[in-house]
Image (spheres, rainbow, N blue to C red):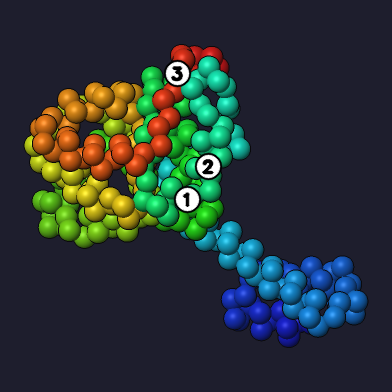
Amino acid sequence: MKQIESQLTRLRLTGMNKGWKSIVETRRVQELSFTDGLQLLLQAEEEERSIKRFERLKTNARFRYQSSIEEIHFDASRGLSQDLITSLATCDYITKGESVLITGATGCGKSFIATALGHHACLHGKTVGYYNTQKLLMRIKMARLDGSIMKFFDKLAKNSLLILDDFGLSHLEQQQQYDLMEIIEDRHGRASTIIASQLPVGSWYEIIGEATIADAILDRLVHTSHRIELKGESLRRKK
């Protein structure tokens, strides 16, 4: 028994090792056929790797909040459709490269929902990047100064899902307009983007600034988007 455990440890088969110990502890070694025992061990290894993959993806995403789809409070008065969230939970929108636009007043749950969708994407094995929009634009500016801008854009483009939180808190400078256009263009039809903003989508033209660039960005985002327009007062005040 100890020799088997040692071999599983050396081979880094953590899930199978845990499964094997469980079988031994419950004295099922003699009861299980070779096929049934092997199936249990393989299942344990698969589950272990799935958990590790999720934790790795979640860590790399750098979520600001911790939330899940199961924690979302559905209320018709909030303008939040359970059918839409259920549909997004399949992650088909990511496969199709569709966007999700979440708008509403401060504290109404935009970031919570965006993060919940991001966590769920990680559960499905998708790579996710979460950014506060202003901090992202600052990060891009620094990357341009140190010469790593193309590498950073490539990193953003490789995420299956990119979440831009708190979009529209300030007007975009000219270079920021081009940077946002570059990000959205790289993702159009290939990867999904979630944008959360206090402002309605109609006001994003003014925030972006230059009409031609604003048209190009919003054309790529809006026409294939799923819209969540939250209503009501801040949930933080209710607490």
* First-in-chain label (3 vs 1): 1
Which residue carries the number 2 mark?
87
Mark 2 residue type: Ser
Q: Position of residue 110 (x, y in %)?
A: 43, 29
Q: Residue at x 12, y 57 (%)?
A: 147
Quadrant location, the C terminus: top right
Which residue carries the number 1 mark?
92
Question: Which label number is shown at residue 9?
Answer: none
The reply to whether callout 1 and callout 2 are in contact (CB within 8 Å) is: yes
Left or right, 228 with respect to 29, comes to: left
Q: CA distance from mark 1 to mark 2?
A: 8 Å
Q: CA distance from mark 3 to mark 1?
A: 26 Å
Q: Residues within 10 Å of mark 2 (few under 14, many from 20)?
A: few
Extreme front residue here?
A: 223
Q: Is residue 108 visible?
A: no
Which residue carries the number 3 mark?
231
Left or right, 84 with respect to 14, comes to: left
Q: Position of residue 115 (x, y in %)?
A: 46, 39
**Frontmost residue, 90 versus 69:** 90
Mark 3 residue type: Lys
Left or right, 159 with respect to 119, comes to: left
Mark 1 residue type: Asp
Quadrant location, the N terminus: bottom right
Q: Is residue 239 visible?
A: yes
Q: Residue at x 43, y 43 (%)?
A: 63
* First-in-chain label (2 vs 3): 2
Query: Callout 3: helix, strand or loop?
Result: loop
Q: Residue at x 53, y 48 (%)?
A: 90
The reply to whether callout 3 and callout 1 are in contact (CB within 8 Å) is: no
